[in-house]
Image (cartoon, rainbow, N blue to C red):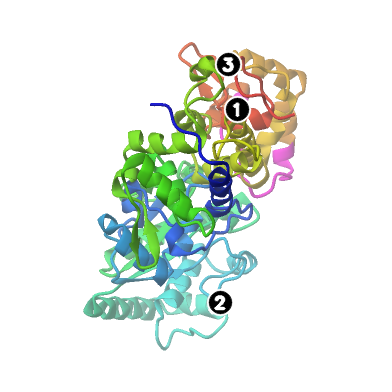
């Protein structure tokens, strides 16, 4: 059955709800600390939230900083307990934020302080001092002193450290509590990757060490590239730690469930959306502790989700009888946000939806117009490209710039190589890296193998895909922002 057009006023109200309620993009990487009602926990994230998961892996925008922030919030943990009992988060633990995306923390040294400390002390000693401080070690640990004095004490009093750790662990066990120390944004530990690596390695080593305690755990949020770096994970028994690694992955149903949960609690349009949900799916939101909770069926049943999204965005990505050949909005949107590793970040998805709502004509009879959804994907691609080239891997912009507007994908690997040779890209990149002008960011690990190695690095990061015939494809979430063409595809940004 074809969807029915929404009344004009209701469509405008729902557009406002979509614009206002979805998570906003924070280029600084800080978490968006909002009312607990806007929190959705995908079923697959249950392991990541478990206190025994010491390492949590996630691509940019997947929720690492979100959970670093929200796990330390009593209000959000209480909400998750009531709204998502299957997660089994539990209330018998205390979470302390150590190093993270914030610029200043009382629980861990800042980047500048870390750099100064490393001139005298080992990375391991620094993190042991952070553990002592976050755990609230009593006397004689100098809890109120400066970091340099705390680290010095840890180095000079190793037996006292071990005894205070044992005492703290016993106290926690007696009280039935677990202490979880949270770490995030490890790419900001220092201004040079040669400094980041030993700090990150020592932190993971200590995370493994504290697993020998009963009631103290580290939870470290990392990007996949850091867990692929042998200089970070190349320590004895690292496999024991990584075997328990959890991943923040978002399936299509998770992304739509996140949107529905947020829109259902929107201050403007939330009522209209909840009514539309019941009308379209025979499922109803429930009110729990002042938060509207998405029906369980709409968290995973893609047929029900598509039925509801069709009421918002129509049934085809074009008008007229031929529109169905272009795809359905429900599947089209996510398919065009997938990276080469088959992942979509909720940040990219939310930004695409928000832009679509903002660019849908005011006289449209649906909350989202298919052309506006295409604009939304373009906007999400621009943001994604800016993230990876400005904040994560500046060298990617350097190697992509000579290709802008000159390639239509899929194409042969030789097409990439010819343009790089013509522009002396690889030679210039090596010179830039030798001068450390690209700073803190992780350089391409296979550059010594020339263009083949560079393509391998881009593939490992999800920026390109190799098809069965070995041609190179670039996912739309990057293709549009980098200005590559594709026959019949969404037009790239200029």
The residue beneath circle 1 is: 454
Disc 1 and disc 3 in contact, CB within 8 angstroms: no
Q: Count neighbours of disc 3 (C-alpha within 10 A) and say few if under 14, some if 14 to 19, many if 20 or more.
A: many
Location of the N terminus (image quadrant): top left
Could you tell me how far apart the alpha carbons at marks 2 and 1 are, in whole angstroms?
Answer: 41 Å
* Disc nearer the start of the sequence (2/1): 2
Q: Is residue 436 magenta?
A: yes
For label 1, the SS is: helix
Between discs 3 and 2, the one toward the N terminus: 2
Dot 2: element:
helix
Q: Measuring from the top left, give residue 341's x and y in whole percent.
A: 46, 32
Q: Is residue 357 left or right of residue 423?
A: left
Q: CA distance from mark 3 to mark 2?
A: 53 Å
Kindly report the distance in space between the C-alpha atoms of the residues bearing marks 1 and 3: 17 Å
Q: Dot 3 corresponds to which residue? A: 410
The answer to whether residue 397 of the structure is visible from this angle is yes
Magenta residues span 432-450
Above or below 166: residue 233: above
Percent of width and height locating residue 364: 60, 35
Along the line of sight, which residue is nearer the eye, 8 or 457?
8
Seen from the viewer's position, the closer of residues 471 and 361 is 361
Give the left or right position of residue 489, taking residue 3 as reference: right
Q: Residue at x 31, y 52 (%)?
A: 47
């Amino acid at each position: 059955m074809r969807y029915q057009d929404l009344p004009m006023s209701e469509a405008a109200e729902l557009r406002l709800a979509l614009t206002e309620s979805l998570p906003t993009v924070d280029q600084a990487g800080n978490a968006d600390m909002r009312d607990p009602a806007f929190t959705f926990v995908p079923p697959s994230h249950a392991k990541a939230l478990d206190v025994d998961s010491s390492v949590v892996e996630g691509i940019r925008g997947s929720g690492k900083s979100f959970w670093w922030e929200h796990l330390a919030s009593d209000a959000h943990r209480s909400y998750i307990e009531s709204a998502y009992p299957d997660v089994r988060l539990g209330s018998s633990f205390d979470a302390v934020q150590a190093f993270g995306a914030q610029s200043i923390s009382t629980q861990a040294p800042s980047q500048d302080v870390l750099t100064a400390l490393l001139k005298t002390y080992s990375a391991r000693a620094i993190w042991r001092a952070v553990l002592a401080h976050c755990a609230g070690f009593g006397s004689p640990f100098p809890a109120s002193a400066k970091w340099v004095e705390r680290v010095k004490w840890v180095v000079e009093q190793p037996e006292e450290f071990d005894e205070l750790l044992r005492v703290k662990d016993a106290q926690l066990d007696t009280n039935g509590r677990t202490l979880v120390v949270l770490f995030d944004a490890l790419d900001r530990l220092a201004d040079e990757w040669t400094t980041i690596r030993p700090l990150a390695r020592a932190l993971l080593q200590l995370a493994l060490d504290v697993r020998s305690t009963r009631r103290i755990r580290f939870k470290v949020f990392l990007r996949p590239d850091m867990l692929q770096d042998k200089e970070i994970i190349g320590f004895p028994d690292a496999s024991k730690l990584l075997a328990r690694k959890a991943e923040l992955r978002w399936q299509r149903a998770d992304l739509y469930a996140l949107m529905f949960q947020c829109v259902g609690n929107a201050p403007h349009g939330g009522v209209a959306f909840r009514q539309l949900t019941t009308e379209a799916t025979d499922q109803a939101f429930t009110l729990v502790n002042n938060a509207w909770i998405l029906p369980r069926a709409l968290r995973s049943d893609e047929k029900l989700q598509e039925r509801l999204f069709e009421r918002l965005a129509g049934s085809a990505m074009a008008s007229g009888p031929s529109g169905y050949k272009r795809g359905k909005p429900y599947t089209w949107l996510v398919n065009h946000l997938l990276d080469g590793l088959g992942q979509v970040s909720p940040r990219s998805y939310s930004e695409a939806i928000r832009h679509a709502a903002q660019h849908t004509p005011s006289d449209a009879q649906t909350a989202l117009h298919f052309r506006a959804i295409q604009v939304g994907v373009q906007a999400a691609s621009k943001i994604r490209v800016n993230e990876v080239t400005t904040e994560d891997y500046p060298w990617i912009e350097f190697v992509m710039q000579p290709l802008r507007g000159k390639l239509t994908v899929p194409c042969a690997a030789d097409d990439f190589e010819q343009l790089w040779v013509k522009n002396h890209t690889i030679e210039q990149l090596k010179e830039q890296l030798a001068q450390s002008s690209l700073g803190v960011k992780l350089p391409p690990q296979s550059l010594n193998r020339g263009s083949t190695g560079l393509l391998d690095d881009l593939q490992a990061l999800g920026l390109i895909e190799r098809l069965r015939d070995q041609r190179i494809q670039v996912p739309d979430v990057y293709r549009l922002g980098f200005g590559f063409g594709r026959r019949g595809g969404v037009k790239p940004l200029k």
